[in-house]
Amino acid sequence: YAPNHKRTEPWRFHLLGKTAIRQVCELNASIITEKKGEKAGQKKLERWLQIPGWLVVTCKTSSNSDASGASMDEPTSLQREDYAACCCAVQNLCLSLHNAGMGTKWTTGPVNFDPRFSEIVGLEKNEFVVG
């Protein structure tokens, strides 16, 4: 649960299975390899494969948002409200997991915004990654 004054509850949680985790790790390693070389990509792959659980949080864009509610640039827009609500949901989840003795990491690296990431995770067209 998180504050959401428009009551759209836009947060979506995608718990990844072993195959999807492997594909995300390999995708990230390929992105790192392109930027920093093969050794850096391999090191990142090995490190990421050690992470025991993967949860991807997305924001579902509202189908009923009009033109005025579709821009993050507009302070009162529905899109901005929904993104803020998703961020609150992530923070609440992280606090809850910490309280249960589990560590978390909220990340928004380049891999999260690669179109192949959306395919691997199975995101709908009206979702974008929050963390």
Image: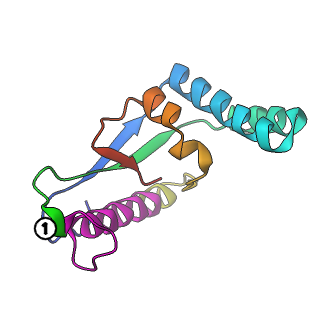
In which quadrant of the rendered image does the N terminus lie?
bottom left
> Splitting the image into 4 quarters, where does residue 42 fall?
top right
Q: Is residue 130 above or below residue 16?
A: below
Find disc 1 in the rendering and name its residue.
6
Q: Amino acid at mark 1?
A: Lys
Q: Is residue 43 above or below residue 66?
A: above
Q: Nearer the viewer, residue 52 or 60?
A: 60
| Span of residues in magenta | 69-95
> In what element is the residue under mark 1?
loop
Is residue 104 toward the left or the right of residue 33 in the image? left
Considering every residue shown, the one lying at the far right of the view is 39
> Splitting the image into 4 quarters, where does residue 49 fall?
top right
Q: Nearer the viewer, residue 19 or 120?
A: 120
Q: Is residue 126 above or below residue 80?
A: above
Percent x, y of residue 54? 52, 38
* Residue at (38, 64) in percent of width and height: 87
Considering every residue shown, the one lying at the far front of the view is 67
Percent x, y of residue 78? 20, 67
Q: Can residue 50 be seen at all in this image of the molecule?
A: no
Q: Main secondary structure of the magenta part?
A: helix
Q: Is residue 7 magenta?
A: no
Percent x, y of residue 57? 40, 48
Is residue 129 toward the left or the right of residue 46 in the image? left
Q: Nearer the viewer, residue 122 or 73?
A: 73
> Splitting the image into 4 quarters, where does residue 6 fall?
bottom left
Is residue 129 toward the left or the right of residue 29 in the image? left
